[in-house]
Image (cartoon, rainbow, N blue to C red):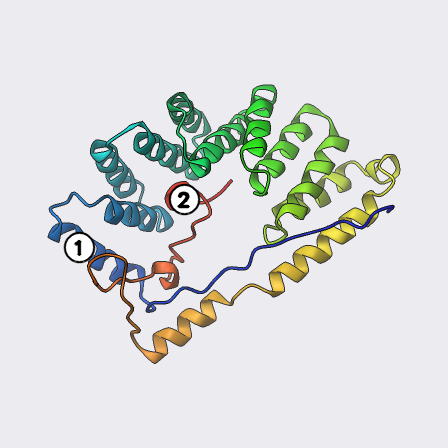
Amino acid sequence: MKDKLLFQFSVGKVPQGEAITSEEAEARLLARLDQRGGQCSDTLWSLAVLYSRTDRLADTRNCLDRLLALAQDLEERAHCILAMGQLMEKYRDYEGAVKYYRQAFEMEPCRTEVWYFINNNLGFSLNQIGMYQEAESFLKAAIVIDPCRPNAHKNLGLCHVGLGDFAFASRCFVEATQVNASDGRSVKHLEDLVLAHPELLVDEKDMAEELEACRKAVEVARAQQPDWQAEWKKRRELGRQEHTGPESGEKHAHYRFGHSSVGQAETAGGMAPQ
């Protein structure tokens, strides 16, 4: 390998707060929503994430419908419709997801994160239904919007696997790992690709070394991550730890430590990234 590959990775930050279960989180959020007359968007988003992570489809959809009704502008509506598409993805209804993402795309939101994931997730879902050529343009657009996220690099790689351009796909998987080695999915895709097409190790002269470098980078990144379950258990045993939230000095719970591990903020809306 002529030049050394450079990698970066993110480290999850353990938030302040107390360790609570999903049931406790739901009870607190419902109480807060009731106190605010059912009109609090922040609380509805938290409930939508909680219900999504605990596989309560109807409750998640109900929250998103209420959020859509409360939306004040196209930006907020696009955010809600993006989350609806993510919900369809969760249940592998990719054609349904594509319909929602196309609606959100027409709204052209200004927020970089929302615009990124509309393009990325639309490309991902088009990949899932075999529409690789159309998916490619959306994934490339997502990379232009934010080249420092790994998702679109990975999905562009999968797109080119579908198109039969395995060499280009392999480079996408390497780039995705370089951008953020904390996301190890691209290494797995690269390993599967090389296993299915060993000629890549000959045609792409540095492939073996690049694959090994990616593996090591993911291993290093993984070793730096907090042990979420251990932290949750420790805080649960120590008892409730409160901190002041951003609104009116109220007590605010972080749901990262619920059994469902709610609270990952990788995508707009808090749904799982693709």
The answer to whether residue 98 of the structure is visible from this angle is yes
Residue 10, image x, y percentages: 56, 55
Residue indicated by mark 1? 32
Q: Amino acid at mark 1?
A: Arg
Q: Residues within 10 Å of mark 2 (few under 14, many from 20)?
A: many
Instruction: Give the structural element (helix, strand or loop) at label 1.
Output: helix
From the image, state whether disc 1 or disc 2 is nearer to you.
1
Q: Identify the disc placed on residue 271.
A: 2
Question: Mark 2: which amino acid?
Answer: Met
Disc 1 + disc 2, Cβ < 8 Å: no
- Camera-side residue: 50 or 120? 120
* Residue 130 can be seen, yes or no: no
Up the image or down, 2 lies above or below 237; here it is: above
Q: Give left or right: position of 98 versus 238.
A: right
Residue under the image location 35 percent in, 51 percent down: 54
Check disc 2 and report its element: helix, strand or loop: loop
